[in-house]
Amino acid sequence: MPTSHHDSPVPDLSGHWEVDYARSDSVQTQLNASFREVQRELRRRRQAAERGASYQGPPMGDLDTLVAVAKMAELVTEPELLEVYQDVRRIRIERENSFALNCELTGAQSVPSLLGAEQCWWDGNQLHFRVLLPDGLLIKHRFVRSADGLSLSQRTALTAPGVARDMEVVRIFSRYDPTERGYRCTETLTRGRVCTTEQAAPYE
Amino acid sequence: MNDWRVLPRLLLLASFYALGSCASSPSDETSTELQEDSTRVWDTVEPLLIAAAPTMPLLDIAVELFDPGVSGEDRSPVAAVRRLESQLLAGELRDTLARSNQWGVVRLVPTASSLTPVSIRAGIAVSDGRDLVLDVVVKDAMGALWFEYTMAYRQQSAADEGFGGIFNALANRLLSVWQGKDRDEQDALLQGAEIAYAEALAPEAFSGMIQRSETDWKVVRLPAEGDPMLARIERIRNQEYLFCDTIDEQYVDMVDRVGPTYRLWRSATLEQTEWLERYQRRAAARTGSAGDSEFTRMQAEYAAYRSFRIQEQALFELAEAFDGEARPTVMRTQDQVFRLEGTLESQYDTWRDLLRDIYLIETGGQTP
């Protein structure tokens, strides 16, 4: 159950973050791990059947759905850049090519709609977001900042009816300074993502 | 949270219910709204009766900024959108009445006043991008009720031009009531409204001229012909009109800045709802082996949700930027300049207090 901890100060996550691939999970690796687990499970079941024993292990779930959830994990964790705005009351995590994750820092909130529902809360250590879609796909994000403030971990777990275990993908983001990139991009309603080059600094 | 696991079912059950009021929504509230929604009769757009020239005598109308139906303390994005809508929709009604060419001057006013012979007040009961339910009350300056009703409009297709035409029925009904009065009644209303305005400003001089009952009123005495007080009151009234004109300017500016995003959001909301309904019909007809693959289904749901949230957040951002930030208004009287700040309502109250002070000074400083 979501709880909130008013006593723990929320670390400042504000700033620009870019994904650090070297330290992040690959969805394919996670999917391979899931398949290996399924294969092990199948082997255990077969061996139990050969022995004539009844198998007591966890249900395996549907493989098609498992693959679908893995592909969804790839889609959901696609944003490579985050821009975080934070004040004492709320936090807003803007994600490249996706909707922003907004949360008040005091108490848990729900934002339901026909197309899906969101929940978020601060648990004293991590910022939690959940998105539930109508057919039951549940997307959970947890954000935690490293002690030195230079990294931001986004742990995303997806689960769906018919899948025995969560598909979890960890992405590590590092701080970056957008003014050093030479260009700047913003999402616009009418034109989508629009990038402009920064004006070069005049020579001294 | 206990309702979290049952939410998918609730969401599916709610397929004909418009996109929900975000940020507050206990399931009890949702089910009550669903029940109301299923029994509601939706209005259809009727043609607006347009006159070649306004009918005489000219009737001025005030459209009060709508009651947004959210607490003033509520700083959530949804509340900000509602407050924005309360101005946009009032402006839309004003434009409809003006377009009909049946009336004198139609003004937006922040709060009720006896400035005009007739005023329209509406409260937003439901507004979610597809459905709009308003509680409308029309009264004259003496406080007598002309009519009240609940208008409920459901946008039928994403191609609809926003809320265009939804106020036609209200405008036509107002016209029918006005034309149902004979000329004496119409003249009495205009006369009564002038006295009611004067009475509000200088009760010591004008009270007792209108006899009111619970449902009706009657002018029993008229001010003396050529009474200089009436001329002063007319000047004060013109100053109040000036304030209304500045509200109009703010409104036009706001529509320019917010209107396109608001229309985009409404259109996107309806598209998403239509998509969801089509999707659910398909899902209901689907058998175990046929139909979309698991991934296609999940991807479509996620894409629809993502798109809806992006549109919604863009509107929220704009609405929050506008929320409670009415521009300061600079008003001039004959020899002074006043700068009014705060919400439109408080600016209006301050301005009316100032006008009253000016009136008292002009008439010798007698406090009633």
Image: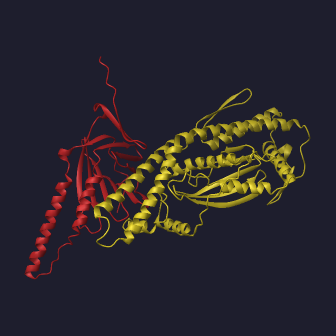
| Vertical arrangement, residue B246 with respect to residue B276, above or below | above
Residue A88, by quadrant, is top left
Residue at position x 18%, y 46% in the image: A23
Q: Nearer the viewer, residue A111 or A73?
A: A73
Q: Residue furthest right?
A: B225
Farthest residue in the front direction? B52
Q: Residue furthest top?
A: A204
Hue used for the chain lettered B: yellow
Query: Is B277 rendered above or below residue B99?
Result: below
Q: Is A42 drawn above or below residue B216 in the view shown?
A: below
Evaluate whether residue A105 shows in this view.
Answer: no
Most foreground residue, A166 or B260: B260
Residue A130 image-quadrant placement: bottom left
**What is the basis of the colouring in this image?**
by chain
In the image, residue B215 sits, relative to residue A149, either above or below, namely below
* Residue shown at the point (66%, 47%) measured from the top left: B94
* Residue B234 rendering spot, x and y as whole percentages: 80, 37
Along the horizontal axis of the image, is B351 left or right of A150? right
Please identify the quadrant where the C terminus of chain B is shown.
top right
Quarter of the image for the N terminus of chain B: give it: bottom left
User: Toward the viewer: A95 or B271?
Assistant: B271
Q: How many marks?
A: 0
Residue A161 horizontal side relative to residue B336, left or right: left
Q: Residue B335: give x, y in percent of width and height.
A: 73, 26
The percent position of residue A61, horizontal first and vertical second, equals 23, 69
Q: Is residue B365 visible?
A: yes
Q: Is residue A63 left or right of residue A182?
A: left
Choose between B322 and A124: the one closer to the eye.
Answer: B322
In the rendered image of this protein, which colour is used for chain A? red
* Left or right for B85, reference B168: left
Dividing the picture into quadrants, the one containing residue B41 is bottom right
Residue A35, position as x, y percentages in the image: 16, 63
